Amino acid sequence: MNVEIYDFLLNKEITYLNHGSFGACPRPVFEKYQEWQRKLEEQPVKFLTEDLYRGLRESRIALADLVGCDQEEIIFFQNPTTAVTNIIYNLKLNEDDEILMTDHEYGALVRAWSEWSKKNKVKIIQKKVPIPLVSEDEFVEAFLRGVSKKTKVIFISQITSATGLIFPLKKILQFAKDQNIITIVDGAHVPGHIELDIHSLGCDFYTGAVHKWLCGPKGTSFLFVKKEYQSSMKPVIYSWGKDGDDPEESEFLQDFQWQGTRDMSAFLSIPFTIEYYKNNIQPTQKKCLELNLYAYEQFKKTFNTAPLSSGSKWLGQMVAHPLPKNINIDTKIILLNKYKIEVPIFKWNNQSFIRTSIQIYNDKNDIDYLMSVLRTIN
């Protein structure tokens, strides 16, 4: 693992194949984050009433340029789960209305939707996606068969968390627009992973993380809200809003940017994070894509189980693979404690999976080491 070459802060004794869960922060980005924290402590009043808002605007401008939207359409959240929860509690749906999603959605958000739906007597429909994924048209047609006259919202990932698959969304989002169905895209794994242009994509809401593939400080995520929905979006936590210090003219921004005293240094680090990503990570990402396809092939050889997709067009820098039924239930613990390999093993749809996430600090030796160990303990 080439942690030293790329100046990441990861423990050099661990073969780290789980970038996707929480990301990893390079030293220069972490130091910029700490620099903002020091500025905050030098003059807290001036910082939190004046400097903060200039910094947030600069962060919105830099991020909007990267993800393809206007800076006035972005608000910051600690994570996509919090962002989507704010959308959920602003929806005005009627009893028996339906929210359509796939069976690949992030578990925490499925739970958030489910708890809200019970209180409001709204139905959650999780459409099963045919596996393995081979044809885009087959995927789109299968998902849209879940749409009914009661479907009011489509919630769908662009890159799935557990299964690591890239879903082609444009046809689904266009169909939804034609049918006046609200679209919410979970893009937690997208920024810094695959190309993103939110306006071109055509959704109503989009959430993404900066702390994952862009390698920003932990707790940096954003929510895109189409301008026509901003007046109906109200924060779960109210604070000063237009009566506070925020100089922005938009009440939408004022309501969400200040929600009481908190350290927002991570958000202010976003312009530097993006610059670092463009200069140091993006130029070598092709290697990561190639290495991920190598892992995809090695999993098939190691376990002789069928993959979730036909390969390259469905995969970025993550691949999840089904494990044999007789897998040692302690495999994850053994990998970490005995062999110092950090990789997630989990249950999805009543089957065990392993998922690798490849970042620029990984190399072929990491994959070969993982496979050799897996052959030994299973």
Image (cartoon, grey):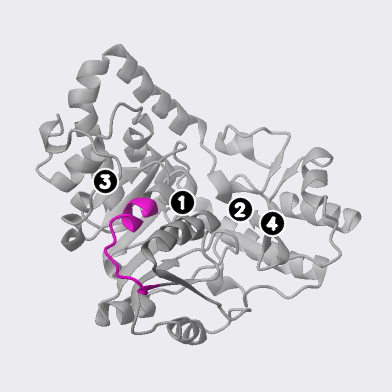
Q: Secondary structure at mark 1?
A: helix
- Badge 4 or badge 2: first in the primary sequence: 4
Residue 23 falls within the magenta-colored stretch:
no
Residue behind mark 3: 235
Percent of width and height locating residue 61? 23, 46
Residue 265: name its quadrant: top left
- Badge 2 or badge 3: first in the primary sequence: 3
Residue closest to the eye, 41 or 8: 41
Residue closest to the eye, 223 or 3: 223
Mark 2 surroundings within 10 Å by alpha-carbon count, few (fewer than 14), some (14 through 19), many (20 or more):
many
User: Marks 4/3: CA distance?
Assistant: 34 Å
Residue behind mark 1: 282
Between tags 2 and 1, which lies in front?
A: 2
Three-letter residue code for mark 4: Phe
- Which residue is depicted at the point 69% across and 60% down? 347
Residue behind mark 4: 346
Three-letter residue code for mark 1: Gln
Mark 1 and mark 3 in contact (Cβ < 8 Å)?
no
Q: Main secondary structure of the magenta part?
A: loop
Mark 3 surroundings within 10 Å by alpha-carbon count, few (fewer than 14), some (14 through 19), many (20 or more):
some
Residue behind mark 2: 358
Mark 1 surroundings within 10 Å by alpha-carbon count, few (fewer than 14), some (14 through 19), many (20 or more):
some
Image quarter where the C terminus lies is bottom right
Percent of width and height locating residue 226? 22, 61
Residue 8: name its quadrant: top right
Q: Secondary structure at mark 3?
A: loop
- Badge 2 or badge 1: first in the primary sequence: 1
Label for residue 27? none
- Which residue is depicted at the point 72% across and 38% down? 14
Q: Which residues are magenta?
A: 84-98
Percent of width and height locating residue 121? 39, 67
Between tags 3 and 1, which lies in front?
A: 3
